[in-house]
Image (cartoon, rainbow, N blue to C red):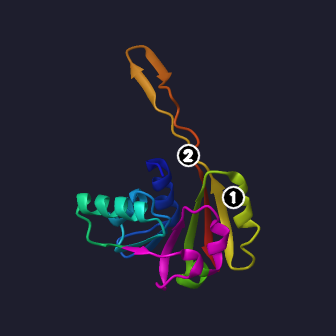
Amino acid sequence: ISLKDIGAIITETGINKESKVLDAGSGSGALSCYLAHIVKEVITYDIEDTAIKITKENIKFLDLKNIKIKKKNIYKGISEKNLDLITLDLKEPWNALSTAHKALKKGAFLVIYTPQITQALSCINKIKNKFIHIKTKEAAEREWRLEGKIAKPITPLISHTGFLTFLRKV
């Protein structure tokens, strides 16, 4: 997940120093580590030993004390309750909608990161009356070279990294 996507998650959800967050599909732990600088507590789930090892190394390197790593399959359940935000970076995020709904506070956010728009569509088609679809978006980033009389985009363009789908528990 890129910084532009992390920034969108933070600004759209309004998480803060009192927030409790679950990040499912931790990968390298980048999102969890970044959020740990902002929120009260981060719990991250992953089922892959390699991802868990890398996440642990990054947490240790950054000396973060407010992240818990669990080797857990989110499709089978979430131990934590009254969460302010759940992020999903999974192959089949629609299979975690029910467990996420049970774990979130009323009005809390579920943010789904998907590389393909068809994955986002599959999620929206399965939310039923549990969530309100706020928006689905992709964030593009384009740096510019400004020097003397030169003003032009710097290539390569960091364009599509994924789609962010923002849902809110009703």
Please name the residue that numbered disc 2 is placed on. 161
Disc marking residue 119: 1
Neighbor class of circle 2 (other Cα within 10 Å; few <14, some 14-19, many 20+) is some
Q: Residue furthest front?
A: 49
- Region rendered in magenta: 69-98
Image position, residue 78 (x, y; %)? 52, 82
Q: What's the amino acid at mark 1? A: Gln
Residue at the spot 51% in from the left edge and 66% down from the top edge: 13
Residue at the spot 41% in from the left edge and 60% down from the top edge: 50
Q: Residue furthest top?
A: 149
Relative to residue 103, is residue 52 drawn left or right?
left
Residue at the spot 46% in from the left edge and 61% down from the top edge: 10
Depth check, front residue: 161 or 13: 161
Q: Is 149 a magenta residue? A: no
Element on which disc 1 rests = helix
Q: Earlier in the sequence, mark 1 or mark 2?
A: 1
Q: CA distance from mark 1 to mark 2?
A: 14 Å
Residue 65 can be seen, yes or no: yes
Residue at the spot 46% in from the left edge and 73% down from the top edge: 22
To which quarter of the image does residue 89 belong? Answer: bottom right
Image position, residue 48 (x, y; %)? 47, 65
Relative to residue 121, is residue 66 drawn left or right?
left
Q: What's the amino acid at mark 2? A: Thr
Residue 139 higher or lower than 91, as above or below? above
